[in-house]
Amino acid sequence: MTNSTHAAAPASEKSNPCIARQPILNASETVIGYELLFRDDPEESRFVADFASSCKTIDNLNAIGMDVLCDGTLAFVNCEHEMLLKEYFFLLSPDEVVVEIQKNVPPDAQVIEACQKLKQGGYSICLDDFSPGDIREALTPYASFLKVDVRQFPPAQSGLIAKQYGSRCQMLAHRVETRDSFVAAQKNGFTHFQGYFFRQPQQMRARQIPGSQATYLRLLQEISKPEWDFNEIEELIKHEPSLCHRLLRYLNSPLLGQASPVLSVRHGLTLLGEREVRRWIRMATTLVMGQNRPSDLVCSSLVRARFCELIGAKVPHGETDLFLLGMLSLMDSILEVPIGLVVENLSLDSVTKEQLLSGKAGGTTILSPIYDLMVAREMGDWEKVTGLGKQLNLSLFFMNKAYNEAMRWAHGVTSDK
């Protein structure tokens, strides 16, 4: 008799792959691309860069869409030996992809020829996890990027690597997780940076929220109250030209199909209704507040919000608004102020406040499994995703479907700025 415990998933479940992305930024903290990490097997607790994974990444780049996964920036796709020789990357546009050659790829004659073809075809090549004495030294003339794990070497040594190769390649510092690491890598000659340093605000940078941002937080505060002051909301929007314009443009878009133009804020708010006004203000204020910060922050804030909202139907969360929890989880980085200052200026329920503060400090609350799942899925921490999914009784298929849908939704919201 066949053991049904590990029965194959239905065919329909194969259409929702696990793809995570890790941002790559330049010195001005502009996102220039994402490394894409793929996982297909629910029993596999970590990302593996092998032929099958690379093929599936390419398949899903085409299926989900490069614009959704990378928001118009470059896709850094892992490539091992077999993948390089089979030339599958020619299925993707050279303007959209960077071929990231893994550390164990030998620089034999076939590999060198493959790199020559890629370069002649206009493709960019990145040598992953590069180090002194690397066996891929012969491939450096074809590389546009050299990626160095800056946690693996003392700063002086990583600086020597950047000095040696920086005149012919763009030096990419990997695992840059803190602001200090970012500054040190810059001083050592690196021009591009991979990691989440930009999501860690400098805690002493601001002791109060700037006046221009305070209005947006007042709006978030107003719509979080049980009883709305409609006149107050209207006045706040009318006194912020960017919000007023964004609202009228949204209301007059073909998406809503209004029979006649909407010319006033009050008319527009009345047409939307309370539920949609609440949702629109949350999205619009996040977009406006984050317009001078790395694009990944705003998009990720909305992905988190929508993902939490989607899984909310299947997990216990009391009266907590999970959409708001997800959206506010990056608000400290968007505003560049401590999360305590953000929470202090909003009328939130005690559970949401406690989780936002605890989530940054490593504490736990009754919402921690949901919050931790949100972060783990975003970062591609598959082992943690699997464990938290079991704890919350969520299947891998459902979590991936929700996350992919959240990415598509957030892309649609942010692409029309």
Image (cartoon, rainbow, N blue to C red):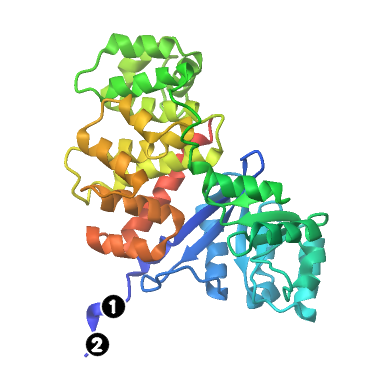
Q: CA distance from mark 1 to mark 2?
A: 9 Å
The residue closer to the viewer here, 132 or 227, is: 132
| Mark 2, other Cα within 10 Å: few <14 / some 14–19 / many ≥20 | few
- Residue 128 visible here: yes
Mark 1 residue type? Ala
Depth order, front residue of 47/339? 339
| Amino acid at the residue labelled 2 | Thr
Q: Position of residue 59 (x, y in %)?
A: 54, 63
Comparing 321 with 83, the one in front is 321
Residue, disc 1: 7
**Above or below — where is 146 with respect to 69?**
below
Image position, residue 106 (x, y; %):
71, 79
Q: Residue at x 21, y 32 (%)?
A: 349
Seen in the picture, residue 298 relative to 123 is either above or below; the reply is above
> Mark 2 highlights which residue?
2
Instruction: Tell me the element at label 2.
Output: loop
